[in-house]
């Protein structure tokens, strides 16, 4: 069964022992950064309420994947062809070929991922599916309309948003990549250099596992309905796989369709906040400086995965 | 009903609009930081396997709170008296006074918190409970055996660990505080300057809501059994409260006891990895540099809340 194997490495590293009681001035290896809190920043929900139509972009029907579970619950996923074009094309071909009809959610690991697919049933892939896609783990920074977040990150030289997506980048290498945040969707795979076809997918349901960035094809994010994945019982097998010997039952998936394959009148319609607007900058500032009557101290900073790009149904 | 009110603020901030396609050198306001990945770092699980008895500390029975739900599921919480002594003393008094026997989990908000308590039943507090505790939202940095993480943080000048806890600190103000990570337990409260008594508690079940740091009393963390909180159906009321009008039922809590109030033979026994040891430094390096056959690219960095301090049952 394809899974995110978490496997062991080889050797031991030098370690340092700080003296108990010592009060260091700053963490080593990087310049200290002082948050500059903003008093009376607009509340994020206010920014959304005040935004205009030009602050939003439609989510394209060809990038909107709809998972329907056997109990009727729906999970809506926006695909990211600008970051993983071959894997996204595969996912469209899998959806159109009926690959996931009758598949199941077979892994729910607490504070990590929920994963679904067909498991070992890989005999005949639908027409158009590339069996060994390239390692779409990063892309060229050039050409991406990046907006730096403005706050330090624990994993990458720079993070921010591009085209509505949370991204990290390295100006020196000229590479950019989608980051793993809550709700991010990636492609399950075996060990390197296998990249997975896209037939087995997972969604992040815990604290952002950013160590997966650049190690796996990130292909989209859940924009509505994630509770149908996150509120499931956890699997008690290794890595959160459901242990059928213990009576844990995978959750059947009735269908997985692209909105573009539905009759136009039946298509769900979403829009997401653009990330290259003044409204989005105000939104980020609001997320970094929560205020109002509840908060005493605005943080003056925010991490990338706590800036959830607003998404809403279109009227 | 006491809850984490998320309320609106007043005014609008200046926003900047980067030019689409522009490639900034670094995020503004802080020096760029370049991760320095470590190849062949020890896998965190290996570090734990190799550790010795001296690398662990016992979790004190007086700091171990045991929630038992009506279905028998148990949630184990370590309390943090070094950070919120009055609130922790209250929590002990609430437990000894039977406050939560017959209480309920009444709020489960996706990617945020699960919250439990007695709601409005605040008429008579158990003996020893302080009705208006001080704002234990931070403490003196001096005297804390801090170990800097070694990587930048998006919220604070410095983060790391102290006495087994994830903390942030500001060398200039001389303050330190517990951070909100997955599993952190805090005290529900009304709007400022109310701090809550400790009678209503929440646990983080999503991406670390670090904006709550210094705005609420953080009193502990779940060390085992969090799935009994995180895998629950989400409430569909505002802020994830269960909407009883829609048939959503709060989850009854049978009892909440301190391990120190159990007969010694019946006490669950846990130990946590010390955070002032070479083993813990190797563990952090391993978390920041995942390797083995699965990972192609070690991150070279890790955020505080992805360094889960290992906890295990004692033999």
Image (spheres, coloured by chain):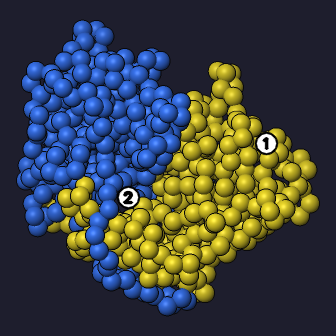
Chain colours: A blue, B yellow
Quarter of the image with the C terminus of chain A in it: top left
Disc ID at residue A129: none
Give the image location of residue B148, x and y in percent.
Answer: 44, 79
Give the image location of residue A314, x and y in percent.
Answer: 34, 23
Callout 1: 10 Å neighbours few (<14), some, many (20+)? some
Seen in the picture, residue A1 relative to A293 is either above or below; the reply is: above
Residue marked by disc 1: B254
Which residue is located at x 41 percent, y 71 percent? B47
Task: Please give left or right for residue A313 compared with residue A156 in the image.
Answer: right
Task: Please give left or right for residue A60 compared with residue B54 in the image.
Answer: left
Which residue is located at x 61 percent, y 81 percent? B140
Residue marked by disc 2: A303
Q: Secondary structure at mark 1?
A: strand
User: Mark 2 falls within which chain?
Assistant: A
Give the image location of residue A239, x and y in percent.
Answer: 41, 47
The answer to which quarter of the image holds residue A68 is top left
Task: Please give left or right for residue B224 compared with residue B294 in the image.
Answer: right
- Between residues A22 and B245, which one lies in front from this camera angle? A22
């Amino acid at each position: 069964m394809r899974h995110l194997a978490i496997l062991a490495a080889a050797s031991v590293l030098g370690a340092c022992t700080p003296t108990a009681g010592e009060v260091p001035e700053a963490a080593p290896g990087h310049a200290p950064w002082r948050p500059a809190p903003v008093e009376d920043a607009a509340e994020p929900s206010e920014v959304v309420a005040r935004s205009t139509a030009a602050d939003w972009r439609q989510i394209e029907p060809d990038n909107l994947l709809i998972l329907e579970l056997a109990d009727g619950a729906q999970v809506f996923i926006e695909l990211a062809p600008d970051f993983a074009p071959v894997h996204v094309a595969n996912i469209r071909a899998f959806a159109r070929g009926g690959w996931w009809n009758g598949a199941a959610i077979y892994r729910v690991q607490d504070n990590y991922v929920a994963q679904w697919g067909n498991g070992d049933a890989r005999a005949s892939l639908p027409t158009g599916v590339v069996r060994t896609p390239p390692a779409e783990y990063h892309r060229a920074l050039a050409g991406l309309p990046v907006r730096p977040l403005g706050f330090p990150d624990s994993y990458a030289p720079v993070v921010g948003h591009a085209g509505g997506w949370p991204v990290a980048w390295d100006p020196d290498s000229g590479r950019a990549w989608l980051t793993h945040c809550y709700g991010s969707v990636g492609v399950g795979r075996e060990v390197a250099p296998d990249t997975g076809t896209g037939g087995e997918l997972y969604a992040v349901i815990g604290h952002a596992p950013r160590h997966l960035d650049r190690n796996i094809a990130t292909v989209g994010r859940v924009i509505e309905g994630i509770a149908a994945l996150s509120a499931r019982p956890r699997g008690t097998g290794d890595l959160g796989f459901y242990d059928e010997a213990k009576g844990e039952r995978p959750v059947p998936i009735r269908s997985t369709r692209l909105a573009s394959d539905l009759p136009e009148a039946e298509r769900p319609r979403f829009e997401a906040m653009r990330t290259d607007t003044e409204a989005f900058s105000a939104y980020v500032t609001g997320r970094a400086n929560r205020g109002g009557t509840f908060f005493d101290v605005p943080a003056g900073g925010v991490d990338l995965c706590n800036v959830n790009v607003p998404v809403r149904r279109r009227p």
